[in-house]
């Protein structure tokens, strides 16, 4: 199959007022599309990204790019979400964690407040996932699409998919919730999400979110990133990648509290790369948006069919959460299917192993 | 059954040299005993505590103490480890995390270096779990006990039990490894343990471990404690305790990045209490000791029978690790039994739900 070559586009959002009543300055939001929209617009599928993801879900920006979009094994010509058949749209989230990635277009605490000419910092209003999906709806409608064939997303993307289905029940026919927390964030998840931002707040450079004119809270941000990575990983891939090798053959970890194993060094190096494109405040605001997610009183709004795809070794959102949600959804008459993704890669199996259920997804999209 | 009333005792360790050749100044180590030693000394059971635990495994120090020792549902008159039948000994670990608990007696970076009259700080040598168990062996032998009926421990306690069985195969007949990482720390666990100490190192007050004459790295330590607690918890108990209630009824979490849910506040309050008795350096040294644990090349030394008791919802050491270890042990001829503790309490079910397998443990101790 030919490799998809993608470009980031942007959509101007004007006069946006959040569900909590906060007015935002006009802003551009990034999006990507794949495939062709049918004349009757009935083949559109929206892809929602995970916590620290972007709208780059498939293909490459350049033929020589090292890695393709995060769900390249799932979206593309002849894949589960077949771009020769469907028109796929993906949109950058509001307060996108990768706000410093030049290809990401979003709005958040790093954006310029037109009333001061300075970045918002901690004066930026808290947004909800409801706001993210309201923006996605504008983008969809700009293509003349009134009803989506489906919305699919891994992890935080599944939260957006379910929020869509509850807020706009007549605008989406099916949702695919991979490695999902389910239909609300329970108190353990609230505390886990909180643990991700404490290190940033601990960094003196954070300055309660007002750091854009000074040194960045890089150390706190790297600590936060390492933590999220550890929780997202499974045992399997790390064992083969690093075993228990030392970071430096001449520095025995038993000889100094500073001497590390290779896996520790690798996580730290990776966090350094990500810290260049992550914005610490956007990470905090994104945690807050997800903490506020709770569809327990809106579940009966949902008319879409639901496909839940938890990963068996997931330690962020274990499969039990999907089974709980299946039960809750079925109790209000929602049509739900659930299949576990098998593997030892933890939460990340929801990206790398999603193709296991290609046949189930194809059947679900056709039912 | 009558409530056990316990007191902490101490044992003087003289002329101790670690397995890596580091000489320690003479120090006192804390221990507790339960029940009576038989004349032929064949009824002794050693209990090894978890990461941030102490030798207080059962009973209360005072009749009006709020909480008993951590395995009070497992050790005592008529319980799985029946103190009317067995003589139970438990010993504080070296570099014990609760070094500032006045009832804990240990040695570590907080101890006075006799050569300077100042706390060791980062000049304290790294110790291994092998050193911890060597000290335990001295305590046991001071009672005239040459062979232990069994050693039992949850989590990090199981690491000590297995290290005992590998290092002193003729001195222990059975080991009970509850909520265990298994027979070595795999790279995911190395990275997870590392993530627990990064926040401490991020705290400027830590000063590379030399903080005893200045302000303590309390913020970093609290962040670390909250993280360990989140990872140790399961979904079940938090749901019923906190649901999604706000920390303050007048402070909607949707209105400010500072406004929290009750569960976030609760974790933070609990970390404040623990930070009073934890020593940040001892936590770092204890992480290091566990990171160094690797019995893959010593497994065939073990002669003891093994009982593995993983907890089904454990997200620190998931049951898969115990199954992997069972297979590895059986491949070198070790007699292994494994039963899962069922529940939704996560890692902590290895403490609160251990009594589920009382009958299995009684049978194991008799076989």
Image (tube, coloured by chain):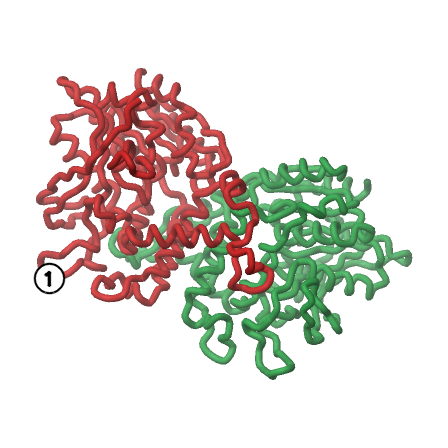
Chain colours: A green, B red
User: Along the horizontal axis of the image, is A54 left or right of B178?
Assistant: right
Choose between B109 and A233: the one closer to the eye: B109
Residue A345 visible at all: no
Residue at disc 1, secondary structure: loop
Residue B177 visible at all: yes
Q: Which residue is mark 1?
A: B116
Residue visible at 45% across and 46% down in the picture = B231
Q: Measuring from the top left, give residue B22's x and y in whole percent.
A: 16, 50
Q: Is residue B181 above or below residue B249?
A: above
User: How many marks do you count on the picture?
Assistant: 1
Question: In which quarter of the view is residue B351 placed?
Answer: top left
Choose between A266 and B234: the one closer to the eye: B234
Q: Measuring from the top left, give residue B310's x and y in whole percent.
A: 43, 32
Chain to which the residue tagged by mark 1 belongs: B
Answer few, some or many: residues within 10 Å of disc 1's Cα (few below 14, many 20 plus, some between 14 and 19): few
Residue visible at 38% across and 52% down in the picture = B271
User: Along the horizontal axis of the image, is B173 left or right of B221?
Assistant: left
Choose between B89 and B290: the one closer to the eye: B89
User: Along the horizontal axis of the image, is A53 left or right of A130?
Assistant: left
- Which residue appears farthest toward the right when viewing the image? A40
Q: Measuring from the top left, give residue A2's x and y in whole percent.
A: 73, 57
Q: Measuring from the top left, give residue A253's x and y in whole percent.
A: 30, 53
Quarter occupied by the C terminus of chain A = top right
Residue visible at 76% across and 57% down in the picture = A88
């Amino acid at each position: 199959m030919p490799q998809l070559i993608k470009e980031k586009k942007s959509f101007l959002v004007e006069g946006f007022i959040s569900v909590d009543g906060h007015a935002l300055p006009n802003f551009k939001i990034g999006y990507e599309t794949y495939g062709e929209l049918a004349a009757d617009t009935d083949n559109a599928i929206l892809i929602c990204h995970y916590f620290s993801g972007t709208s780059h879900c498939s293909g490459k920006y350049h033929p020589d790019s090292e890695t393709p979009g995060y769900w390249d094994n799932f979206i593309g010509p002849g894949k589960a979400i077949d771009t020769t058949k469907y028109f796929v749209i993906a949109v950058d989230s509001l307060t996108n964690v990768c706000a410093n990635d030049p290809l990401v277009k979003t709005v958040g605490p790093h954006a310029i407040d037109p009333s001061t000419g300075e970045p918002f910092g901690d004066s930026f209003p808290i947004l909800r996932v409801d706001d993210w999906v309201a923006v996605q709806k504008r983008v969809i409608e700009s293509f003349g699409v009134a009803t989506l064939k489906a919305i699919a997303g891994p992890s935080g993307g599944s939260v957006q998919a379910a929020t869509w289905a509850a807020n706009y029940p007549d605008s989406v026919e099916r949702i695919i919730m991979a490695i999902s927390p389910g239909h609300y964030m329970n108190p353990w998840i609230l505390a886990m999400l909180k643990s991700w931002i404490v290190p940033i707040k601990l960094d003196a450079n954070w300055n309660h979110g007002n750091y854009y004119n000074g040194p960045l809270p890089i150390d706190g941000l790297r600590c936060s990133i390492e933590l999220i990575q550890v929780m997202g990983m499974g045992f399997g891939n790390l064992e083969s990648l690093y075993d228990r090798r030392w970071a430096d053959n001449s520095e025995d970890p038993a000889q100094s509290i500073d001497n590390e194993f290779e896996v520790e060094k690798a996580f730290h190096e990776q966090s350094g790369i990500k810290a260049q494109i992550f914005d610490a405040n956007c990470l905090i605001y994104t945690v807050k948006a997800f903490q506020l997610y709770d569809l327990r009183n809106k579940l009966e709004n949902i008319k879409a069919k639901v496909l839940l795809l938890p990963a068996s070794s997931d330690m962020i959102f274990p499969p039990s959460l999907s089974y709980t949600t299946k039960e809750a959804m079925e109790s209000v008459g929602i049509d739900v299917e659930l299949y576990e993704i098998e593997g030892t890669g933890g939460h990340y199996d929801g990206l790398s192993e999603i193709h296991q259920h290609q046949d189930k997804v194809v059947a679900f999209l056709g039912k």
